[in-house]
Amino acid sequence: MEFHIFLQFPDDYSDWAAIPLLIISSMATALWSFQDVLIVLLSMGLTSRYHRLNKFVAKISAFEKKQIKWDNKTEALKVYTWRKIREAYVKQAALVRKVDGSIGGMIVLSCSCNFYFICLQLFLGITTGKSISNIRRVYFVVSLVWLCIRIGSVVLAAADINVYSRGALNYIYECEPHCYNVEVVQVSNLVAKKPAKFDE
């Protein structure tokens, strides 16, 4: 962005002013990029934990479909397994809530910064009009596309957490009626709610 500042005031250019501005701008860009990468990686980690839980629920549901006869021992084991699944979902929801409380402000800041720079790039691209060279025109387009990709990655990675948190519902609803017990109903009720309400 320091490039645009010097273009606005070409007569006031000074090496002593440019060097600190270049250093500060480079550090700000690096922190901004690190912030986006951190949000995406944390979101992917939480999503992968939900994905593993959902796969486990899918395997348990598929196994219970094949079982037709249940005795007391297997029924107790089934209840115990679904209780552990419910506890795992509660712990995962608590982790999501804790991470959200820690980086929620960072997500808002990241989206705000990305949105501001998208608007800035659009404004500069529109106001300069046809007076700019082809190289600068390509720069504006590439920069705008890159910013859109960044904000899209952050938002979609964070939104995947909510999508995967409800992924087990499909497998639970496919269970046969004889597979249902109190714990299965509780798991389905927990997963159907928002993650913030899992521990109620």
Image (cartoon, rainbow, N blue to C red):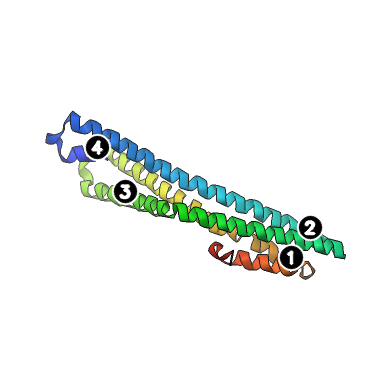
Alpha carbon of mark 1 to alpha carbon of mark 4: how far?
Answer: 61 Å
Q: Are marks 2 and 3 in contact (CB under 8 Å)?
A: no
Mark 3 vs 1, N-terminal side: 3
| Mark 2 surroundings within 10 Å by alpha-carbon count, few (fewer than 14), some (14 through 19), many (20 or more) | few
The quarter of the picture where the C terminus appears is: bottom right
Residue at the spot 31% in from the left edge and 43% down from the top edge: 140
Kindly state the secondary structure of the residue where label 3 is placed.
helix
Residue at the spot 69% in from the left edge and 69% down from the top edge: 185
| Mark 1 surroundings within 10 Å by alpha-carbon count, few (fewer than 14), some (14 through 19), many (20 or more) | some
| Mark 4 surroundings within 10 Å by alpha-carbon count, few (fewer than 14), some (14 through 19), many (20 or more) | few
Q: Is residue 62 visible?
A: yes
Alpha carbon of mark 2 to alpha carbon of mark 3: how far?
Answer: 52 Å
Q: Are marks 1 and 4 in contact (CB under 8 Å)?
A: no
The quarter of the picture where the N terminus appears is: top left
* Amino acid type at image mark 4: Phe
Q: Is residue 70 above or below residue 54?
A: below
Q: Are marks 3 and 1 in contact (CB under 8 Å)?
A: no
Mark 2 vs 4, N-terminal side: 4
Residue tagged by mark 4?
3
Kindly state the secondary structure of the residue where label 2 is placed.
helix
Residue tagged by mark 2?
63
Residue tagged by mark 1?
175
Mark 2 vs 3, N-terminal side: 2
